[in-house]
């Protein structure tokens, strides 16, 4: 399970963001837990994105993925 503030990457799109909350969605008459993610600067989406938890993966702070487009402190959306 992810914590608020964790950095995650979408498994399908590869987009990075910071976890800001949780939600739920009904898929095939079943409640699915969703993750609400605020994008990092320099990526294609600006508004928070929400998708099922299974579509996200945790990115450790020392991961090279965070530094591909500049330093982490410049990528976080204020």
Image (spheres, rainbow, N blue to C red):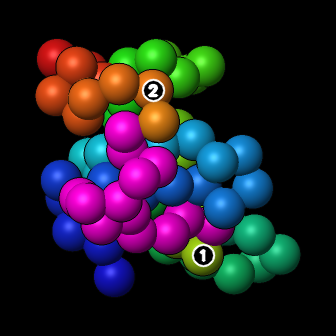
The residue at which mark 1 appears reads as 54
Between 41 and 61, the one lying in front of the other is 61
Real-space CA distance between mark 1 and mark 2, rounded to the nearest whole angstrom: 25 Å
Helix, strand or loop at mark 2: loop
Residue 25 visible in this rendered orientation of the protein? no
In this picture, which residue range is highlighted in magenta? 55-67
Find residue 37 and report its horizontal and vertical position in percent: 40, 44
Camera sees residue 14 = yes
Q: Is residue 16 magenta?
A: no
Q: Nearer the viewer, mark 1 or mark 2?
A: 2
Where residue 28 appears, x then y in whole percent? 83, 75
The x, y position of residue 65, in whole percent, is 46, 49
Judge left or right: residue 13 versus residue 53.
Answer: right
Q: Is residue 66 magenta?
A: yes
Name the residue furthest right. 28
Which of pointers 1 and 2 lies earlier in the amino acid sequence?
1
Identify the residue at horizontal 37%, vertical 39% (top origin): 67
Q: Quadrant of residue 73?
A: top left
Q: Which residue is mark 2?
A: 69
Q: Quadrant of the N terminus?
A: bottom left
Nearest the viewer among 48 and 25 is 48
Q: Is residue 43 left or right of residue 73?
A: right
x 24%, y 34%: residue: 72
Q: Is residue 43 above or below residue 12?
A: above
Mark 1: give few (<14), some (14-19) or many (20+) Cα within 10 Å. Answer: few
Nearer the observer, 9 or 25: 9
Looking at the rendered image, the quarter that the C terminus falls into is top left
Locate residue 40, reporting x and y percent. 37, 29
The residue shown at (53%, 47%) is 50
């Amino acid at each position: 399970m992810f914590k608020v503030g964790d950095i995650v990457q979408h498994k399908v799109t590869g987009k990075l963001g910071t976890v800001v909350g949780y939600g739920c969605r009904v898929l095939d008459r079943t409640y699915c837990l969703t993750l609400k993610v605020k994008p990092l600067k320099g990526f294609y989406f600006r508004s928070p994105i929400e998708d099922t938890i299974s579509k996200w993966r945790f990115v450790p702070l020392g991961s090279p993925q965070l530094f591909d487009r500049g330093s982490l402190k410049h990528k976080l959306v204020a």
